[in-house]
Image (spheres, grey):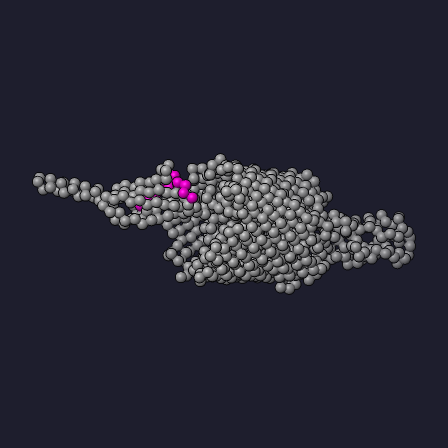
Amino acid sequence: MIRSVLYSLFLICFLAAQVWAQGTITGKVTDLTGDVIIGANVLLDGSEMGAATDADGMYVIENVPAGSHTVTVTYIGYNDDSRSVSLGDGETAMVDFRLAESAVEIGGVLVYGASRKLERITEAPAAVSVIPEVELKRYSATGQAPLLFDSEPGIDLVQNGMSDFNLNTRGFNSSLNRRVLVLVDNRQPATAFLGNQEWNGLSKPLEDLGRIEMIRGPGSALYGANAYTGVVNITTPSPRELVGSRASFSAGEKNSVGTDFRTAEVIGNWSYKFNVGFKQSGTWSQSRNFGSSLIASNEDVEEYSALSPEAVPVDDSKLRNYYGSARLDYDFNNNSYMSFEAGMAQAENEIAVTGLGRVQITESFRPFWRTAYTGENFFFQADYTGRTTGGPVHQRSLSSGASFEEDSDTYNMQAQTNFDILDDNVRFVAGISQRFQSVDTRETLTPDDYFDNQTGVYGQVDIKLGEKLSLVGAARIDRSTLHDTEFSPKAAIVFSPSKSHSFRGTVNRAFQTPNYSELFLRAPAGLPVNLAPLEAGIEAAIENQQGLPPGSVDLPLNFGVTPVLALGNEDLEVEKVTGFEFGYKGIISNKMFITADFYFNQLDNFVTDLLPGVNPTYPTYEVPAGIPAPLVPIIEGAIADALGPNAALFSTLPDGSQALVVSYANEGEVEEQGVEVGINFYATDRLLLSGNMTYFDFSVISQAAGDQLLPNTPETKFNVGASYTGNGWDASVRAKYVSEFDWAAGVFQGTIPSYATVNVTGGYDLTDNVRLGLVVTNLLNNEHIQLFGGSVIGRRALGTLSIDLE
């Protein structure tokens, strides 16, 4: 009994000593501006002890055992922060935290492209999406940068083959889309001849592309030509942000293999980075030269119906991409730096869909360089982008068998300054750009070499009218030797009743220039037609009708082997769009980020597809003067009977020769409207649930005879997804549904059946330096087409191994 009492007293004293040995950890959590953060989670690592910050940003963790501890604070939209603390018996330790905003899509994300200045995404006067950097890592093995945009609201992404993509937003996509301006470190990598983006021409792996923004809506007021429906702004990391080395390897379905190596180092004020890479894979593109009875169902695997046979088969060699770049920076002591960068990409054997049919590009070499100075209030850059196909055998039309060449160069210079006045309540941005461009097709696509230059001057003013209201005005003037001078204005109003919510209204004008093909094209559109027998038949018919002896009638028709030509129109004007947009961005309970955008656009001056009889330079064939009037209807009837629906193509060229001609013209007016809604729900700090819906509608006000103005855009699209990051591994799943829609672009016109796809990615960190990854696109292998005339797309699974080297 006594022993039990003594034991109890000892236990009570021991527990009391332990309580006495416990202490308290308290402190305050703010952001970098000093604003308190309410509801942040503060945890004691290795235990279940913790607290949440109150209305004053304060937290208190009591009964903490004496000793050394690590305290970690987490809050959605901010980077985690950890501090070590030593706690003595009965002590109270003060541990404050200042959290930096993280790159999750929440109100703290900073964007640049909407206003050419850094601003919070909730304050940007445009619809903006930011691609999280973790997505770059997840999809890097594919080498397919456009896939990063596939689940974003308002995006029209269609794929042909392995790396031929057309990225658009808000309607009127095409097989060679150039309505979205793409910038990589302020350089335009688009092709000079067609103006489209060759996505296999990037010189860096996806995971090193850095910050990627997608601005939806007209943007010519700041960016000039071809920022027609949006801008993709890519800012790659500096060498100082990538210090160290990394090697990665990938392999998977469609005979896919790839490798990348990158290294970066800092030496005093100098820093450099260097990368090389290689990708190889099979393709989904198949030959179509075996007849017109192609597979009728897109659920059957080969191809789909309603496609005309091609003249030559596909070269089924593997697709290959070789690329690399090197960058050297010098950092001054005033927060400014100089950059010198050069690189190249060579793509082999990809097939592109064009208005005239499919083209196989067996080799395309894309060199570039740029030099830039970046300061706090001034930026200057000079850059060069080239493209050469390396000879006539390296770019071939599958429909006609004709070979094409291109050797083009684009030089660009630009400068921009910005400054604030009136206690930073008024901010000015002003800039100027000058571009020189040359295109030489060795007379395979155009009859001559062409040179142009373009000058742009722009400015923008942002005015803060108190804490809640901002006004934005911008304008740009573009002068070019290819088109008339264009004026592109922009106005916006942004109302932010709180830091977490903003409403905006904008009006923009933008333009898209005709490309060199539309202006100067001269290329075969099909196999030549021998019309000499037609002339002989007309003469024989006249002889028979008039009872004349054979050979007595000799008409000056001069019919013979007649080419089928696609010809440009040098009188084309720019396409124009005026856009009105209303949008909302909001953060609910710091767990849900919501965007909603409504737009109404007026589009006019469309450049038509290649059509007969629309270009007055190539009028419909007329019987030569001097032929007796009674014979004219006989000749015209014979031509109509012989050529059928192609009789409208029969034209007299300026030199007096004949050809079957299709050309371009400006014609058409359209009104379009749509709604884009997106939700990101941060269920926890590690689990993100997302979804978005896009609705699109249009009305054709007028169009050219024989043309078919279709937006090549589904009425509805839905995306849902979930991603998890934590404990050394991450995973994501995305599902997409696209409703049925009609497609018309050049010779390819038909219906795209509705389709659904599921993409899955995942990764696991074996060690601090070794990561395994997996990416599967179209997981369920739902074989489908995304543009009419393109390939049937199936599943592709890739595994990756990445090693960070010391």
Q: 489 above or below 530?
A: above
The residue lying at 72 percent from left, 59 percent from top is: 447
Front position in the image: 251 or 236: 236
Asked if one can make out residue 124 in the rendered structure from this viewpoint, the answer is: no
Q: Position of residue 667 (x, y in %)?
A: 70, 44
The magenta stretch spans residue 42: yes
Q: Main secondary structure of the magenta part?
A: loop
The residue lying at 32 percent from left, 45 percent from top is: 95
Position of 230 with respect to 251 (left or right) is right
Position of 718 with respect to 764 (left or right) is right
Q: Position of residue 439 (x, y in %)?
A: 66, 59
Could you tell me which quadrant the C terminus lies in?
A: bottom left
Asked if one can make out residue 474 in the rendered structure from this viewpoint, the answer is: yes
Front position in the image: 463 or 578: 463
The residue lying at 37 percent from left, 43 percent from top is: 29
The magenta stretch spans residue 599: no
Front position in the image: 695 or 439: 439
Could you tell me which quadrant the N terminus lies in?
A: top left
Q: Position of residue 354 (x, y in %)?
A: 64, 53
Q: 511 above or below 363?
A: above
**Span shown in magenta:** 33-44
Q: Position of residue 123 (x, y in %)?
A: 51, 41
The residue lying furthest to the top in this view is 497
The residue lying furthest to the front in this view is 422
